[in-house]
Amino acid sequence: MTMSVNEEKTDTRKKVKEASVTPLTGRPRQRGKKPPADWPEVGEYARLEYPDELDEDIIVLIEHLIEERGTISG
């Protein structure tokens, strides 16, 4: 079954919209924006905000994943 031109445009628009929002929040992605220099590191933040929910091993794992992502993406 082939799609009509309008269906293709709608499908493309849907894909673009899905790619332009963050999966967890549904909010638009902030491209090119960097956090302020005074924001805490992710590990420090996790320890302050989630001391009972997050184990130290999980915090370290998250930090490593973020570091790896930064080296992979440039």
Image (cartoon, grey):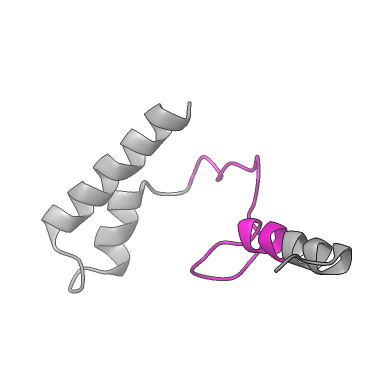
The x, y position of residue 60, in whole percent, is 19, 48
In this orientation, which residue lies closer to the viewer: 37 or 71? 71
| Image side of residue 16 versus residue 65, left or right | right
Extent of the magenta region: 14-38
Residue occupying image coordinates x 64% and y 51%: 30
Residue occupying image coordinates x 70% and y 69%: 1
Q: Which quadrant of the structure image shows residue 27?
A: bottom right
| Image side of residue 21 versus residue 56, left or right | right
As drawn, the residue found furthest toward the right would be 6
In this orientation, which residue lies closer to the viewer: 38 or 10? 10
Q: Which quadrant of the structure image shows residue 66?
A: top left
Q: Is residue 13 magenta?
A: no
How many marks overall? 0
As drawn, the residue found furthest toward the bottom would be 52
The x, y position of residue 16, in whole percent, is 71, 57
As drawn, the residue found furthest toward the front would be 1
Residue occupying image coordinates x 80% and y 69%: 7
| Image side of residue 50 versus residue 37, left or right | left
The x, y position of residue 68, in whole percent, is 32, 35
| Image side of residue 73 versus residue 63, left or right | right
Residue occupying image coordinates x 63% and y 63%: 18
Q: Is residue 2 above or below residue 62?
A: below
In this orientation, which residue lies closer to the viewer: 46 or 7? 7
Q: Is residue 71 above or below residue 67?
A: above
Q: Is residue 30 magenta?
A: yes
The x, y position of residue 61, in whole percent, is 20, 49
Task: Please tell me whether the stretch drawn in magenta is mainly helix, strand or loop.
Answer: loop
